[in-house]
């Protein structure tokens, strides 16, 4: 079968390309161990409720994000994001990075589809090549972070929705997807070919 748009490879970020949750790592990186622990303790009841499916995932995430970063200058936030990618490159799974490089080398498209915030995901791929990031986007007001999200949390069905916004003609490309959690299942099912928990030793 011919695919006019060729091959598209869609990668989840947290857990698939990383060894740990980037939101938690980023909070610790910016706030330090003490404030990270205080944040974790403050939201433990909501996190438990989320795990029990009694409270929406996106609401917990937005509350945690707002608590940690509301009122910060966007420029300062982006500087932290750039430093985070430089100083915490070891959180990446090398086999995943090698796969992305091989995808680009063959002339195919590589897309990161993540519930994490675009601002700190994008810098991890700037030196690799033309990697497009679809993630959760944050709101600012005149350069100050409001603590709210501009988009829906890019999780579950939202991953498929956002991919289709970018590439709506589904029959025109062969999709290969990589993921590692419940939030990736719709994307994995949507793909022609999928891999669950790849890039591990």
Image (cartoon, rainbow, N blue to C red):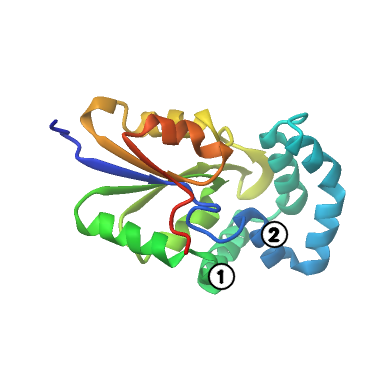
Q: Which mark is residue 88?
A: 1
Check the image and report above or below for 38 versus 193.
below
Query: Where is residue 169 drawn, in percent x and y?
Result: 27, 26
Q: Is residue 99 left or right of residue 144?
A: left
Which residue extends farthest front? 201
Query: Where is residue 125 drawn, in percent x and y?
Result: 41, 60
Q: Which mark is residue 145?
A: none
Q: Nearer the viewer, residue 73 or 164?
A: 164
Residue drawn at (85%, 58%) of the image: 38
Query: Where is residue 84 drawn, in percent x and y?
Result: 57, 67
Q: Is residue 201 left or right of residue 39?
A: left
In which image quadrant can residue 19 be found?
A: bottom right
Residue drawn at (31%, 32%) of the image: 167
Residue drawn at (83%, 67%) of the image: 34
Query: Where is residue 21 drawn, in percent x and y?
Result: 62, 55
Crowd class of label 1 (few under 14; some 14 to 19; many from 20; radius 10 Å): some
Q: Dot 1 lies on which element?
A: loop
In which image quadrant can residue 32 be found?
A: bottom right
Q: Is residue 155 left or right of residue 161?
A: right
Q: Is residue 95 in view from this perspective?
A: yes
Check the image and report above or below for 44 versus 189.
below
Name the residue beneath numbered marker 2: 27
């Amino acid at each position: 079968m011919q695919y006019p748009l060729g091959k598209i490879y869609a990668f989840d970020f947290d857990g698939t390309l990383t060894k740990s949750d980037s939101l938690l790592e980023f909070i610790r990186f910016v706030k330090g161990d003490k404030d990270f622990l205080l944040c974790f303790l403050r939201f433990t009841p909501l996190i438990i409720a989320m795990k029990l499916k009694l409270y929406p995932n996106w609401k917990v995430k937005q509350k945690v994000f707002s608590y940690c970063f509301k009122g910060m200058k966007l420029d300062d936030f982006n500087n932290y994001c750039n430093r985070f990618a430089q100083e915490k490159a070891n959180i990446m799974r090398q086999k995943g990075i090698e796969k992305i490089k091989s995808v680009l080398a063959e002339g195919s498209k590589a897309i990161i589809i993540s519930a994490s915030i675009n601002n700190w995901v994008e810098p991890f791929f700037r030196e690799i090549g033309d990697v497009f990031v679809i993630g959760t986007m944050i709101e600012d007001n005149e350069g100050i972070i409001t603590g709210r999200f501009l988009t829906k949390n890019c999780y579950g069905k939202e991953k498929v929705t956002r991919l289709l916004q970018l590439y709506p003609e589904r029959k025109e490309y062969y999709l290969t997807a990589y993921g590692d959690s419940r939030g990736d299942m719709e994307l994995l099912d949507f793909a022609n070919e999928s891999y669950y928990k790849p890039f591990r030793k």
